[in-house]
Amino acid sequence: MKDIINNIFRRRKVNLTRLPAYGFSEKKGRYFYHTVLPGSGFSMEVEITGKGLVKATVIDAETNEPYTLHLTDSASGSFITGVKMDYEQVLTDIAEHCFEPDVFKGTQTKAIIAYVRETYGDELEFLWAKTPDNAIWRRKDTQKWYAAVLTVSRSKLGLPSDEMAEIIDLRIEPEQMEATVDNKKYFPGWHMNKRSWYTIILDGSVPEEEIYNRIDRSYRLATK
């Protein structure tokens, strides 16, 4: 059970304000949800703590006892598979509707995410299942990207370290690239067109206010 729950919720954080609208009831700081699995008729109880820890239990309708075969790798059969699929679907739907992405951990990265949300009303889009540590922001009107937030090894930027770093890619006028990129604070755009994108490591080496201004500039450039 922990593996299934961890796989679904491990890169997310709970938004407690969304739980009541979904159908959760609150009792002493814990939130409870009940549903019936369509294929089996079994009951399913989901409990979420204020910190976002998730517990889920399936109850056999005939015995009124917990059912666990869907959590056992060695168990097989179409009925068990159906219960497992329904169980995972309920949890996935809760994750998508009541939780938010929580991939990036850096203090500066979180500040920038908050700035973009407050300024433009945009949320990060995680487009690539194979690279879940990468996301983008795009303008609503043109659908063009104006920033990407990624996690890469510093060595990929030409630095003498394999330490992982959170970075942001931003647009820039091609004629400004040479004067901007110094390979210390500003780097050629990682996985982007290096004529019109550059990279900043989100480790405090560039002040947040300057990054905000550069995000605004990149946003304006995403109109063409």
Image (spheres, rainbow, N blue to C red):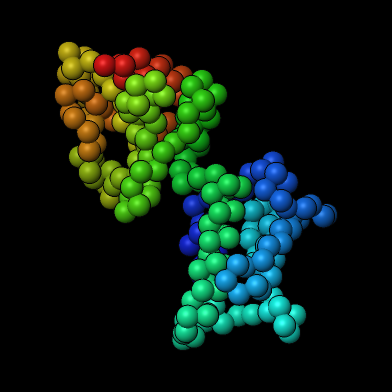
Q: In which quadrant of the rendered image does the C terminus lie?
A: top left
Q: Is residue 54 above or below residue 139?
A: below
Is residue 80 shown to the viewer in this render?
yes
Q: Position of residue 194 (x, y in %)?
A: 18, 28
User: Does residue 186 lie above or below 104 as drawn?
Assistant: above
Residue 203 position by quadrant: top left
Across and down, in percent, residue 171 comes to 28, 23
Residue 18 image-quadrant placement? top right
Give me the residue at 48% from left, 22% from top: 120
Q: Position of residue 74 (x, y in %)?
A: 46, 86
Figure quadrant of the N terminus: bottom right
Specify the farthest residue to the right: 28
Of 213 and 163, which appears nearest the observer?
Answer: 213
Q: How many marks?
A: 0
**Residue located 71% across and 51% down the image:** 23
Which one is in front, 97 or 103? 97
Note whether 56 is above or below 169 in the view shown: below
Give the residue displayed 22% in from the left and 38% down from the top. Answer: 191
Question: Is 77 rendered above or below residue 167?
Answer: below
Q: Residue at x 74, y 58 (%)?
A: 32
Q: Is residue 210 visible in this depiction of the protein?
A: no
116 or 207: nearer the viewer: 116
Residue 167: x and y in percent read 35, 36
